[in-house]
Amino acid sequence: MNETDWTPPELLKMSGSYWSACTLHAGVKLDLFTLLSEAPATAIDLSARSGLSERGLTMLLDALTALDLLKKYLGVYSTTPFSAEFLSKTSTKYMGHIISHHQHLVEGWSRLDESVSSGEPVRDRFSHEPSEAERESFLMGMFNLAMQMAPIIVPQVDLTGRRHLLDLGGGPGTYAIHFCLHNPELQATIFDLPATRQFANQAVSRFSLQPRIDFQSGDFQDDEIVGRYDVAWLSHVLHGEAEEGCAHMLQKTVAALEPGGLLLVQEFLLVEDRTKPVFPALFSLNMLLGTPGGKAYSESELVVLLQKTGLERVERLPIDLPNGAGVICGRCPE
């Protein structure tokens, strides 16, 4: 929004926008969309089935209907085609995991002033010390997001002749899966923390790619990357580190690449003065809340970091992505 577009009503709309978000979060956490996709119901019936307060449930169902995520006719609630597709656990396109992850972030965001004052995080990193519920929503939330993005990105990245891909910090391995699906001769290794393995195994099994994708446990800052690769994919891992940590991670990755190897980095990219796009600027605050040194980077900052590892022909690929995301690639000398 431009400065000239601001009005007091728009300002108040932004200030209270978390009301809508929390309404969605509650609907997902209580699994109302799954229940109603199975069978439309009145609030009284749904209260009996779920054990939830009829009063509270009626108010929430009405609010979700006002948000056009449910329909109501003669007191009977049902899902919309959209909510049935993306908010019911019975759908293969379910996005509730990332929405649950967003709910887990709310408490930290409510303390943003504290984090700004101290310059320190106010929550633990979800990738390292989460509860079981937080770990699942984080990792499967990354799966939700990557399932949206991988079909856009993968066909636009030429891996002709490449044989072994390293998916560093790959979580459930969504990108490794899609790169292998698109490149029949490619094998892949997912490198991530040990607690991630079960989620990666489930995702790889879902696509029947066990013979071509394996998992290597480790912390990408502290542990050795075993094996040799001719392409490495780093999707949204650098923003969790300060520049020194990024440089260390990139050097280790490049050391694992064969001559002529390709390194690909996906991140939310800021313009040079760091004030646009909106999403990367806000995402940088999310890193302030949860990491000691992480932040969103500008394109030029990442280009310089890749060049310092000795990579050549470092450039941003012409792939149009939402939320200010971009893919930067560099090549190892032959």
Image (cartoon, rainbow, N blue to C red):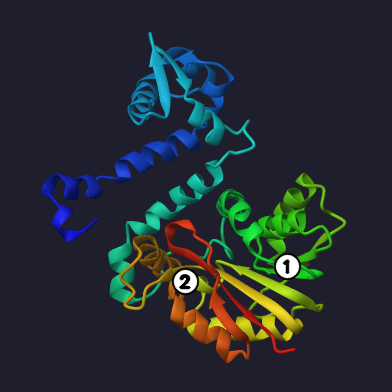
Horizontal side of 58 relative to 88 (left or right) equals left
Q: Nearer the viewer, residue 30 or 96?
A: 96
Q: Nearer the viewer, residue 155 or 221?
A: 155
Q: Identify the residue position indicated by label 2 in the image.
A: 291
Q: Secondary structure at mark 2?
A: loop
**Residue at x-position 57% and y-position 49%:** 148
Question: Looking at the image, is 286 positioned above or below residue 182?
Answer: below
Q: Identify the residue position indicated by label 1 in the image.
A: 159
Horizontal side of 69 relative to 145 (left or right) equals left
Which image quadrant for residue 43?
Answer: top left
Q: Nearer the viewer, residue 169 or 314?
A: 314
Q: Secondary structure at mark 1?
A: loop
Instruction: Give percent across and percent down for residue 262.
Output: 69, 77
Quadrant (top left, top right, bottom left, bottom right) of the N terminus: bottom left
**Residue at x-position 24% and y-position 45%:** 16
The circle on residue 184 is none
Q: Earlier in the sequence, mark 1 or mark 2?
A: 1
Instruction: Give percent across and percent down for residue 191.
Output: 72, 68
